[in-house]
Image: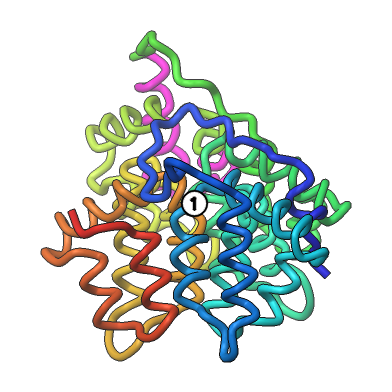
Amino acid sequence: MALVSEFLGQLSLNVAHEPLYPTVVPARDFDPDRDAARIETAIKTKGVDEQTIIDVLTKRSYSQRREIAFAYEKRAKKDMITALKAALSGNLETVILGLMKSTSQYDASEIRGSIKGLGTDEETLIEILCSRSNDELVEIKKVYSDLFKKDLAKDVAGDTSGNFAKLLLALVDTKRDEPSAIVDYEKIDADARALYDAGVKIKGTDVNTWISIMSQRSVPHLRKVFDKYKSYSPYDMQESIVKEVKGDLQKSFLVLVQCFENKQLYFAKKLNEAMKGKGAKEKIVTRIIVSRCEVDLKKICSEYKGTFGQSLQQTITEHTKGDYQKAMLSLCGPDQ
């Protein structure tokens, strides 16, 4: 049972060097007692007042939701997460319970869900491990150990194999260089040549060289490396990955490179892919919007509109319905 104390015991503020572009920010004139009373009434209402729950919890930051949960427990002598779980169902329940975790707790729980039980949900595992910054991964590892009393690297190793496992474990190892103010042109050239020599230039692929460069160099450095790479290779880095490796390893390298080049565009494309045709792949839409709403969802929205000529909010309106739609739109904020 996920109790308030378990998820809310440690308020870990994500240390992020990357600039933040959140759509969910702390509410002004915040009163946790008033919010807790509103939530209590909404849960007790016959048929449950979902709208109030959405209005309150999607418009507060994680640290504010945490305060509401403590105020609720004091008031109702009940655990708020348990009460919400009992009152809600389906996709809305998934969203609201996701919001009761910090960003790193949410990511850690999604990873745990993807490797627990029979089979592995590689897509979730790849998306999270290959798109999170070094600082985010350091925090996720710590939170994973706190929440599940397990070691993330051991769990990943136990559920994956071959070069795919090697790449994910190198990322979990969080040995990436910090960005430097000094541009090392010699190292950029050496890395670009090494990536070419290890792949397109030879028969087969020296995957270990690719893994070490892509898991250890800073992101600004790698962007310059991929630019330089084009002067050695007839294919750009993404095309080379498609030619050289297959399966989950290919998917992982592609997510990495797309995120090095423009992380928010990667998420925008993934959201678009999840809402093609009829309906939506709610699991993916929920995961991206809940995990990024306090990080960079504002920028994802602007990349989305610039790329697809329609706002993310408009797409969500067309492909989802009911309370789930209301919650998603509220997390995205107004159409800019």
Relative to 275, 31 lies left or right: right
Relative to 27, 121 lies left or right: right
Decide: is 51 above or below 230.
below
Residue 98, given in percent of the width and then of the height, sits at: 60, 63
The magenta segment is: 186-211
Report the residue at 57% width, 75% height from top.
42
Quadrant of residue 123 within the rendered picture: bottom right
- Residue 163 in view: no
Q: Which residue extends farthest left?
A: 309
Q: Which residue is label 1 attached to? A: 60
Residue 92, given in percent of the width and then of the height, sits at: 52, 77
Q: Amino acid at mark 1?
A: Arg
Quadrant of residue 270 within the rendered picture: bottom left
Membership of 188 in magenta stretch? yes
Report the residue at 80% width, 62% height from top.
3
Residue 53, given in percent of the width and then of the height, sits at: 52, 70
Report the residue at 50% width, 44% height from top.
30
> Tell me, what colour scheme is on the image?
rainbow
Query: SS for tag 1?
Result: loop
Closest to the observer, 27 or 239: 27
Q: Quadrant of the image for the N terminus?
A: bottom right
Closest to the observer, 246 or 280: 280
Closest to the observer, 31 or 80: 31
Decide: is 215 above or below 83.
above
Report the residue at 28% width, 81% height from top.
276
- Residue 76 in view: yes
Q: Residues within 10 Å of mark 1 (few under 14, many from 20)?
A: many
